[in-house]
Amino acid sequence: MLSQQFADAYIGRFASRSDYTRHRMAEQGWTAILQTQGMDPYFDVQRYERHLFSGEVTAVDLDGWQPGRGIEVFHRRPASS
């Protein structure tokens, strides 16, 4: 049961929060749309990153143990109703 919960929550290893944010934007199609429409200079990527990491995902920083290892990203558990 716990192993399934881990597998459901785990997204992957990324070099940094900004690396995950760029990955998520591409996955959602934001990157292509913003570039096609010439809007990418106006999109606040740092603000979107804060949004992701404050509400949708959380990260375990691996660099504390060995620099250059990056972060492990997980979906946040939904709030109990």
Image: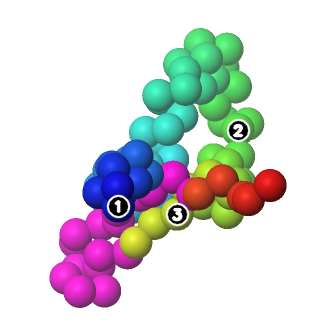
Residue drawn at x 40%, y 72% is 60
- Between residues 29 and 9, which one lies in front from this camera angle? 9
Q: Horizontal and vertical percent for residue 34?
A: 63, 23
Q: Which residues, given as a range, are shown in magenta?
A: 61-76
Which residue has dot 2 on it? 43
Q: Secondary structure at mark 1?
A: helix
Amino acid type at circle 3 is: Thr
Amino acid type at circle 2 is: Phe
Which residue has dot 1 on it? 2
Camera-near label (1 vs 3) is: 1
Query: Pointer 2 and pointer 3: residues touching (CB < 8 Å)?
Result: no
Q: CA distance from mark 2 to mark 3?
A: 22 Å
Q: CA distance from mark 1 to mark 3?
A: 18 Å
Q: Horizontal and vertical percent for residue 59?
A: 45, 66
Report if residue 10 is visible in the image: no
Which residue has dot 3 on it? 58
- The quarter of the picture where residue 38 lies is top right
Q: Is residue 73 left or right of residue 43?
A: left
Q: Secondary structure at mark 2?
A: loop
